[in-house]
Amino acid sequence: MNIQGWGEIALTLGLAVMLGWPIGIYMSRVWNGERTWLDPVLKPVEAVFYGAAGVDPKRSQGWLGYAGALLAFNLAGFVLLYAILRLQGVLPLNPQGFAGVSPHLAFNTAVSFVTNTNWQSYGGEATMSTFSQMVGLTVQNFVSAATGATIAAALARAFVANRGEGVGNFWADLTRTTLYVLLPAALILAVALSGLGIVQSLAANVHATGVEGGSQTLPLFPAASQVAIKQLGINGGGVFNVNGAHPFENPNAITNLLSAVAINVMGWAAFFAFGRTALAGRDIKALAAAALIILTVSSAAMYVIETQPAPSLVAAQVDASVNMEGKEVRFGAPASTVWSVVTTGASNGSVNSMHASFMPLGGALQMFLMQLGEILPGGVGSGIAIMVVMALLSVFVAGLMVGRTPEYLGKKIEAREIQFAMIAVLILPLAVLGFSAISAVFPTALAGLLNKGPHGLSEILYAYTSAAANNGSAFAGLTANAPWWNTTLGLAMLFGRFIPAVAVLAIAGSLVVKPKLAPSPGTLPTDNGLFIGLLIGVILILGGLQFLPALALGPIVEHFQVLAAVAGA
Amino acid sequence: MTQITLDTSRGDPREGGRASPLAGGLSGAMIGRAVGDAFVKLNPVKLIKNPVIFTTWIVALLSTISAAAAIAGGQSAGFAVQLALWLWATVLFANVAESIAEGRGKAAADSLRATRVTTKAKLIVDPKTGTVVPTNASELEVGSIILVEAGDVIASDGEIIEGVASVNEAAITGESAPVIRESGGDRSAVTGGTTVVSDWIKVRITAKPGSTFLDRMIAMVEGADRRKTPNELALAVLLAGLTLIFLIAVVTLVGLGAYSGVDLDPIVLGALFITLIPTTIGGLMSAVGIAGMDRLLKVNVLATSGRAVEAAGDVDTLLLDKTGTITFGNRMATEVIPVPGVRPEAALAAAVMASLADETPEGRSIVELGRNAGVSVDQPAGAVAIPFTAVTRQSGLDVGKDSWRKGAVDAVLKDLNLTDGSAPAEFRQAVDRIARSGGTPLAVTQNGALVGVIHLKDVVKPGVKARFADLRRMGLRTVMITGDNPVTAAAIASEAGVDDYLAEATPEDKMRLIKAEQAKGRLVAMCGDGANDAPALAQADVGVAMQTGAQAAREAGNMVDLDSDPTKVIEIVEVGKQLLITRGALTTFSVANDVAKYFAIIPAMFVVALPSLGALNVMRLHSPESAILSAVIFNALVIVALIPLALKGVKYRAIGAGALLGRNLLIYGLGGLIAPFVGIKLIDLVISGLGLA
């Protein structure tokens, strides 16, 4: 640990929040249909889309209509992507001549990119054609992120309405977020990244002779454009198998910092956009503060955990310096650890180091951050949406203690909201623990594990956590490209994405028709330090505690075993 | 009119000669009955309404079967038997809590039932001749007309159509002083079960048999058709959701444990599950709700539903009638201002002389003012009272040739052939000042000469200003409703410290105000007694009708104040808040408890197979069995320990929402985190000391 390392961590976290603010204000203007400086260029384009689809962007939909449109759009996206992957062998732009993808992998991958998870059971450079990457995966990188944003936009509007009806127009929200926010941002970042040395090429492999004389085949891709949206859309799926640890995807310290900041920036932007659209800037800043506090403490903890020497190496008198296993040596421990925290705190999942090789407690922390529900700051819009669900639960449990039936942002929180909030929260433990428990005793599943014992269990837990939380990162020991894993992980991703999404929209539908209540001195303040503390408590206890027994059997026991083994040796 | 004070400290309602049928403490017999009821409530059909406790019931049953199987198989089952017993105890303790809470209502209902009419009513069969036929109360139909004479119990609810009588309503209100009931106006409603003390009345029956006020009152205090309130429903959903989450966490441990080579005893998993689910609040929730209604009963207020009590906690705007609530209701003399050349004492003495024969409250207040200032208030011999007439608009006293008069300023000036211009400037200024401050000036003359002006003032009750400041801190806005002109209203409003006022208010204005407040998203509470208050009472979120008020008002409101005290609405709001706070506090406590329970049970479950997890046994509990048993025992006993709090309620403090949350979070949140660590450790010491595990 050193001051430079702490500085690097602070810079990564701080820059993302600071950039997120202005972008959030802009994003809110886009959601609200206010004038933006891109209107002259994009308005006509937008109109073409609406005209072609026969959509009236001004028509506000009820929550059911909105949710129906969302599901229909995503189903169509899934079918299209599945078809592209299966047919990639006969489709153009396939310089490496890859064959079609197997059915279960195509299912898993299509679900993965539609759900904004970007779990990859495959190695990109050895499986996906340029066409599949550009037309299939990258398109979903944009629209799956925009789908998340639509959920937040609809929920934000529900808080403003006073006995309203509609929560907005899904098609307009989707189109405007993609067109006005994600495309321009990705364009800027892609140009910057390719300028900084990330590969952007439609050519096939290059052949090179290495310094030791061996022949190498280096696959090329239009990587910069994909890296930009994989981070900004909080998707995380790499062009190359090792993701941000690959020199073509992440060549130097500057691209590393830019990428790490880009992981979080749109998540924060969605927080601030929500605050502005919901006319509750201060309250949403309190939610952002709670998220930032957990993220900062986690980053610090991770940095401390991962800059210790490995106990077994010390015991064997081999190495007493910082344990570098799994970390990206080009960037060092701080850049590796802070990336691993932000990528698990956001539902990004891109990596620049190997999470499975972190110390057991480091791995536990990565899992725990995902198990909190991807709200730190989570995906574009999906993060703030679940964070608001957490706020509703906090307000409900503790808000009673001020002697009023709970309300949040001027809306009464009653049985219906709590019901859907619980559904949104419940699905994560159900999918993670349910699938893990089955896989843990299912021989076919266990065949995919590299390690036995607690670390093997961690591989299982991590995989389902990552899938259900729509993160996408992995404990690399697991060989997931098998029917059982591809199918169950795909299901975990589907449940983890669409059940909370529909639940949040149902909450929006319930809130939008309620009267907007005026605050009084008797109203629970939700914009101060006390509420931030309360919210953190609820997130940790309601959101995280149920995973403690499972974590105890995986990384926590592994941690104590390492200590015990060293003490015994 | 009885003098109403704003002191709402909760005294024993039996003080002051009242013995409300609704008051009553907790007796040993009631607790005995509650324990008996707790066993009756083990019936799963009844328990299913409470998912958390029902779940506990199922696990207790499964544990019992598992323990029995162990015994039958000849295995040592001491641990399993103890666990099963404590799980049953958890369910029983929750039932006891509910039964105790219900007990007080049941006792009150019993005493009310005893007053139900058994005597025959005198049904008038022929209105012309007035022939009466003795008829059972249960045979009276709506519209029947009965005769009630002195000593008779009124058979059912009705409207007086003829006659005046004094009625003892102690059976309902506990107030033994009889009240006057007469036909026409707002005092024409009579309640079945009350007794006519003098005179006679003819009453048209307005209630069907079995749905009289008394019947409804019995049903309400007994909680016969207690339904979950919206907030209870939402909380039940949350608790059910938490139960499901912990079910997932515990059931999946079977698979995860099997992978790790941990042999998990189902009975231990059941124990973990029960300690994690929110049994504390689940067990006490209905007791909290019933106790809330009960606290209202104790202050002699009947709520038609738990929903109304909850709404009371949410009230933002309180509409208060000026007269009787904010002011004493009668104008009182506060000073006498002399004209130049007259000594103040002389002016006061003249005012007293002019008022000696005046028996109105205003007149008496002038005499009182004089008495307090040491002026003689004895009526001289041979004094002749000159009464007030609409023509002279003055009254006074003549003694021999001397005369004293007081009256409306313009009438007096006209009598003295003075005009506004020719009256002394100081006099005119005093009159203006009094009028501007909302008071009433009365001119005083002695032997045809102007001596001064009396300041009559609507006197604000002492302490109301502080009370309204409290309400403001609670987040309530107070609006004063008055028929006074805006000038008077503004003056009293500022003196009393209300937030707003509605002057020259008609019932329609009141209604409009309520709707306007509600449109702004505020909940409104009001009280009223007149028939013309009925629409507003129905529109308000919390409408408190006075028991002495009109029948229409009593039916429109969702609460009835048996004391007919308009200030009671403030206490009602406090009871509502207290109810919600108690519920929130217990939920927070319950959820916060889980952290310690994990630290007790997880190492205990896994430590045999994975010894290194013993490091998580931060409480250093004696053995895996003692750790699990301690957590289960703590979980059961904490319900018992919190029954008094659930019944009494967490005290509401008007310190603002932020401060209140901070305080309660500290006690019930942080306390809930720490308490089980201490409690489980202590129980572990005891059971390991006793060699139980």
Image (cartoon, helix red, strand yellow):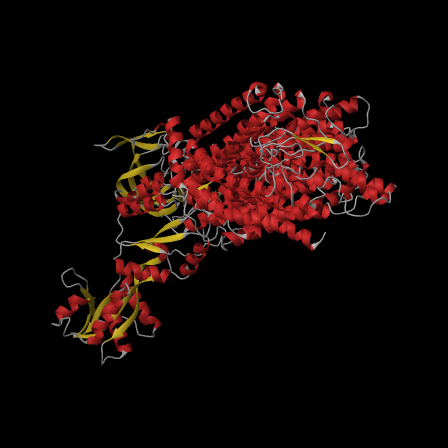
Query: Looking at the image, how many numbered discs can be counted on the residues?
Result: 0
Q: Nearer the viewer, residue B571 or A308?
A: A308
Judge whether residue B233 can be spotted in this image: no
Quarter of the image with the C terminus of chain B in it: top right
Looking at the image, the residue that sits furthest to the left is B417
Q: Nearer the viewer, residue A56 or A64?
A: A56
Judge whether residue B573 can be spotted in this image: yes
- Residue at x 45%, y 39% (from the top left corner): A180
Quick check: B571 left or right of B637?
Answer: left
Quarter of the image with the N terminus of chain B in it: bottom left
User: Where residue A271 appears, x then y in whole percent?
Assistant: 51, 44
Q: Nearer the viewer, residue A114 or B482?
A: A114
Looking at the image, the residue that sits furthest to the bottom is B341
**Residue A312 picture quarter:** top right
Q: Nearer the viewer, residue A345 or B427?
A: A345
User: Where residue B20 appears, x then y in whole percent?
Assistant: 46, 45
User: Where residue B475 appears, x then y in whole percent?
Assistant: 44, 52
**Residue B612 picture quarter:** top right
- Residue at x 26%, y 61% (from the top left corner): B487
Quick check: B491 left or right of A86?
Answer: left
Quick check: B52 left or right of A21?
Answer: right
Quick check: B382 left or right of A533?
Answer: left
User: Where residue A121 appears, x then y in whole percent?
Assistant: 65, 27
